[in-house]
Image (cartoon, rainbow, N blue to C red):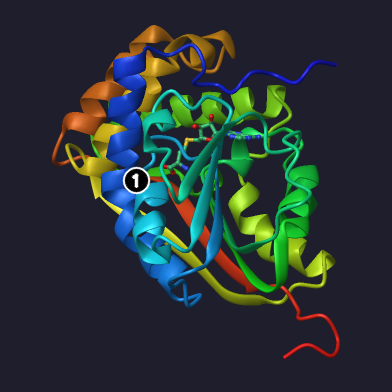
Amino acid sequence: MSTPKYIFTETQYAQELERLRAIEKIFDPTSCQRLKSTGLTSNWRCLEVGAGAGSITQWMAGRVGEKGQVIAVDLDTRFVATLASSNVEVLEGNIQHLPLEHHSFDLVHTRYVLVHNPDAHAVLPRLLDLVKPGGWIVLEEPDFAAARTIAGEDSACQSVNKVNQAILQMFTARGMDYSLGVKLPALLQTYDLQPFSVEVDTHLSHGASDIATMMKMSTVQLAEKYIATGAATQADIDNYGRFAENQKAWAIYYATVGVIAQKKLEPGLK
Ligand SMILES: C[S@@+](CC[C@H](N)C(=O)[O-])C[C@H]1O[C@@H](n2cnc3c(N)ncnc32)[C@H](O)[C@@H]1O
């Protein structure tokens, strides 16, 4: 069976860039705090997997300085190609297949990347192999099972719940785990890594907030795929959009699970 394409592959350049910038605006402050908690500093070598629009790559490059290095990988580097510089290398391809064996990193980071991979459970050991002994991995992945409406008109809430059901069905049909985030701490333990920190960010958001607006963008871009599941109609998509604009409509759109872990030092090393 061939691997399904990344779900946002066919979306328009400007629309997708706007969506990725919205994600960065909302989540970068928390991501940067998590990354800083590893001790990220000058001279480090970092791997940013699924670099998207590149804000974290740029931020890491500033932290590691001229003697450090950031490798930014994405299936499609259309938004990050211009970031290549003396301490940033941009590589296009699937992290599963890029020849990175000769590298070893102080820090490997993903945000909303593994969840898009049907073989996420196989990608994780690949990422761990790329972390040097004593190095860090920071994973930030969603749990869409946390999604629910809290307040709003009944009919609008019903449509939002139908769209959430469509999201579940689309992920399942593609072999992707839409609750991957909550499984990561246990998964890391199977590779003998004890998480240093586990956090679940569950934003309770009103319509017209940054999260609601970003989720509306995703829903518009993926409308055809959601409708194809049979769980939601175009009318539900339209109602979802109105719900996400209504300041009095509240929902949890999804939760983000942030896991930080350090790879053990090889015996005898300090
Ligand atoms: C939802 S976007 C998140 C972008 C960025 N990490 C952020 O949070 O701002 C997911 C990105 O991961 C990339 N991606 C997904 N699976 C990948 C893989 N196996 N190898 C490399 N990139 C991947 C996609 O192309 C996309 O740019």
Coordinates of residue 196 in the picture (x, y in percent): 60, 78
Q: Is mark 1 within 8 Å of ligand 1?
A: yes
At a point 39% along the width and 28% down the height, the residue shown is 79
Relative vertical location of residue 265 with respect to residue 24 in this rendering, above or below: below
Whether residue 98 is visible? yes
Residue type beneath disc 1 = Ser
Q: Specify whether 118 is left or right of 227.
A: right
Relative vertical location of residue 42 with respect to residue 150 in this rendering, above or below: below
Whether residue 250 is visible? no
Please identify the quarter of the rendering in which residue 152 is found. top left
Q: Which residue is labeled 1 in the image?
A: 55
Please identify the quarter of the rendering in which residue 270 is found. bottom right
Coordinates of residue 233 in the picture (x, y in percent): 44, 10
At a point 70% along the width and 62% down the height, the residue shown is 131
Relative vertical location of residue 199 with respect to residue 119 in this rendering, above or below: below
How many numbered discs? 1
Specify the farthest residue to the left.
Answer: 247
Task: Classify mark 1: residues with Cα within 10 Å, few (<14), some (14-19) or many (20+).
Answer: some
Instruction: Classify the position of the N terminus by image quarter.
Output: top right
At a point 77% along the width and 46% down the height, the residue shown is 121
Coordinates of residue 67 in the picture (x, y in percent): 46, 64
Q: Specify whether 87 is left or right of 208.
A: right
What secondary structure is marked by label 1? helix
Q: Specify whether 36 is left or right of 249.
A: right
2 and 155: which one is in front?
A: 2
At a point 58% along the width and 27% down the height, the residue shown is 75
Coordinates of residue 156 in the picture (x, y in percent): 29, 27
Relative vertical location of residue 31 with respect to residue 77 in this rendering, above or below: below
118 and 263: which one is in front?
A: 263
